Amino acid sequence: MSTYFRDANEWISQAEAARLRGVSRQAIAVLVKKGRLPALKIGGRLLVRRKEVESFTPEAAGRPPK
């Protein structure tokens, strides 16, 4: 077994991540696509780490200050 995938309980689906954060599944997919939330693809399913989802902090909206 891969050392990256030791504990199966620490990886959750995008839908479960969305329920934890109170957002849509598509919002989680966008974060994964932008690289803001690391993911693992297994058998066509994208999985994210529960710890990463729980500790995720969104960036401030709008343009960054100069």
Image (tube, rainbow, N blue to C red):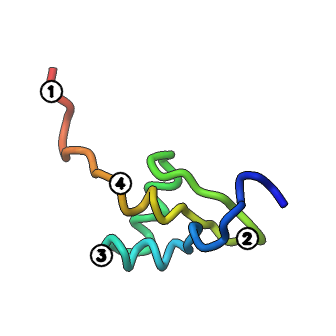
Pointer 4 local density, CA inside 10 Å: few below 14, some 14–19, many at least 20: few
1 or 2: tag closer to the N-terminus:
2
1 or 4: tag closer to the N-terminus:
4
Res 44 label: 2
Indicate the position of residue 36 as horizontal and vertical percent values.
44, 47
Indicate the position of residue 45 as horizontal and vertical percent values.
67, 71
4 or 2: tag closer to the N-terminus:
2
Do labels 2 and 3 touch, CB within 8 Å? no
Name the residue beneath numbered marker 1.
Answer: 65
1 or 3: tag closer to the N-terminus:
3
Mark 1–mark 3 Cα distance, whole angstroms, equals: 28 Å
Residue found at the far left of this picture:
65
Do labels 1 and 3 touch, CB within 8 Å? no
- Above or below, 44 against 3 in this view is below
Residue found at the far right of this picture:
1
Name the residue beneath numbered marker 4.
Answer: 56
Pointer 1 local density, CA inside 10 Å: few below 14, some 14–19, many at least 20: few
Q: Select label 4 or label 2 by which is in front.
A: 4
Residue type beneath disc 2: Gly
- Above or below, 30 against 61 in this view is below
Residue type beneath disc 4: Phe
Under circle 4, the secondary element is loop
Mark 1–mark 2 Cα distance, whole angstroms, equals: 39 Å
Under circle 3, the secondary element is loop
In depth, the one of 3 and 43 nearer the eye is 3
Q: Residue at x 48, y 78 (%)?
A: 15
Q: Select label 1 or label 4 by which is in front.
A: 4
Indicate the position of residue 40 as horizontal and vertical percent values.
65, 58
